[in-house]
């Protein structure tokens, strides 16, 4: 790249400057990994919960758990940054276990507070690297420990996670499904999964990526319409992600999308605020 070219052209002195820069970045990253490891122990990583609602009635049906990290110095660091960091550094199993545990604890708490008004399902995002035989075991054990019915858990996986191990992934999904966990494909339409594979996999739900929902306003409903029809044809539910406006919600209902999620419905929020939101939506 350009920096390397300049470093070479500039001779020895430049190379050592470059090396210092690279070494500094590596040190920053190691520090951030250490901080993340500590954060998982001391409560600096938490879950926010974003509601999913029935597209027709607006009735709330569940929530998606989204990991949040508040760094003592850098402030909020998004999962787009720290999930890949956890994947690279061997912390993804610890993060994954934390997320499942915290989600189950929260469901049990909501049940105690809200009874039948509690969210019926909590969706947890699972990394490609977690998609192995330990995952069904982890979910089953954690749900049991918290007295939460396993059918209250939905695992969200991206197409690329499924395609990373096309031979092994179906077995893991079968096992999860056999236990009673439901399965959603996240960001559907942005990856490269084959439609034939979709029919073979035990999937319950397709989540239509936000990029397609935001195209609706520009007069491009084609992909959203096709995915909603595909889901309906296969007997799956469909969730539109990133619904921000009432106009989008109306078009999505017309296109036959079954569920909505997005800032226009509700933002991700802490567990207590989410309880209030669900209680306020009771009808
Ligand atoms: P995702 O699972 O597709 O989650 C949806 C993302 O879109 C979330 O970002 C959410 O806050 C955001 N979002 C929801 N509604 C709207 C909207 O109306 N407008 C816009 N602009 N954004 C909206 P977030 O929380 O930053 O998460 C980003 C990604 O990080 C997630 O994408 C998921 O892939 C990953 N992630 C989050 N939490 C976890 C986790 O606990 N484990 C793993 N493995 N990945 C996670
Ligand atoms: Mg998700
Ligand atoms: Mg998504
Ligand atoms: Mg998305």
Image (spheres, grey):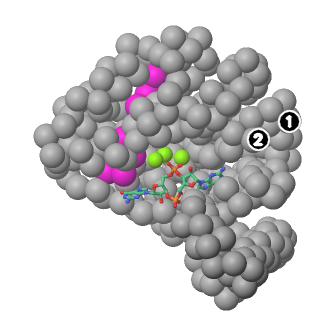
Q: Is residue 260 visible?
A: no
Image quadrant where one finds the N terminus:
bottom right
Which residue is drawn at the image coordinates 21% and 34% (left, top)? 221
The picture quadrant where one finds residue 59 is: top left
Q: Could you say whether the residue bearing mark 1 is in a helix, strand or loop? A: helix
Give the numbered dot on residue 130. Answer: 2
Give the mark count. 2
Closer to us: 182 or 34: 34
How far apart in space, not on screen, are marks 1 and 2 (Cα)? Answer: 8 Å
Which residue is drawn at the image coordinates 42% and 63% (left, top)? 267
Which residue is drawn at the image coordinates 84% and 30% (left, top)? 133
The picture quadrant where one finds residue 70 is: bottom right
Residue 139 among magenta residues: no
Query: In the image, is the residue at mark 2 within 8 Å of ligand 1 by its beta carbon?
Result: yes
Residue 188: where, in percent of width, then height?
Answer: 45, 34
Q: Which residue is mark 1?
A: 134
Residue 178: where, in percent of width, then height?
Answer: 73, 20
Furthest toward the bottom, the residue is 73
Closer to us: 78 or 182: 78
Closer to us: 207 or 167: 167
Which residue is drawn at the image coordinates 67% and 88% (left, top)? 73
Tell me whether the residue at label 1 lies in contact with that at label 2, contact meaning CB atoms closer than 8 angstroms. yes
Residue 170: where, in percent of width, then height?
Answer: 70, 19
Please report the bounds of the magenta region as a residue range.
236-243
Residue 156: where, in percent of width, then height?
Answer: 59, 39
């Amino acid at each position: 790249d350009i920096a390397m070219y300049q470093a070479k052209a500039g001779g020895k002195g430049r190379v050592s400057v470059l090396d210092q820069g690279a070494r500094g970045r590596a040190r920053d990253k190691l520090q951030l990994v250490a901080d993340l490891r500590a954060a998982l122990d001391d409560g600096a990583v938490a879950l926010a919960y974003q509601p999913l609602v029935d597209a027709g009635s607006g009735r709330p049906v569940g929530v998606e758990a989204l990991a949040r990290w508040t760094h003592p110095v850098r402030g909020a660091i998004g999962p787009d940054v720290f999930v890949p960091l956890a994947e690279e550094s061997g912390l993804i199993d610890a993060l994954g276990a934390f997320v499942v545990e915290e989600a189950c604890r929260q469901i049990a708490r909501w049940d105690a507070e809200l009874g039948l008004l509690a969210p019926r399902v909590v969706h947890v995002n699972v990394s490609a690297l977690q998609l192995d035989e330990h995952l069904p075991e982890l979910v089953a054990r954690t749900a049991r420990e918290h007295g939460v019915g396993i059918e209250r858990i939905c695992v969200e996986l991206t197409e690329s996670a499924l395609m990373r191990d096309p031979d092994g992934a179906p077995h893991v999904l079968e096992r999860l499904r056999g236990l009673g966990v439901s399965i959603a494909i996240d960001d559907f339409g942005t990856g490269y999964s084959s439609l034939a594979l979709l029919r073979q996999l035990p999937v319950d739900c397709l989540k239509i990526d936000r990029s397609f929902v935001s195209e609706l306003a520009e007069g491009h409903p084609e992909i959203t319409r096709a995915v909603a029809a595909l889901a309906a044809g296969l007997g799956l539910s469909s969730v539109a992600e990133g619904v921000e406006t009432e106009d989008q919600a109306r078009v999505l209902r017309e296109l036959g999308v079954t569920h909505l999620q997005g800032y226009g419905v509700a933002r991700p929020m802490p567990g207590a605020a989410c309880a209030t939101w669900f209680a306020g939506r009771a009808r």
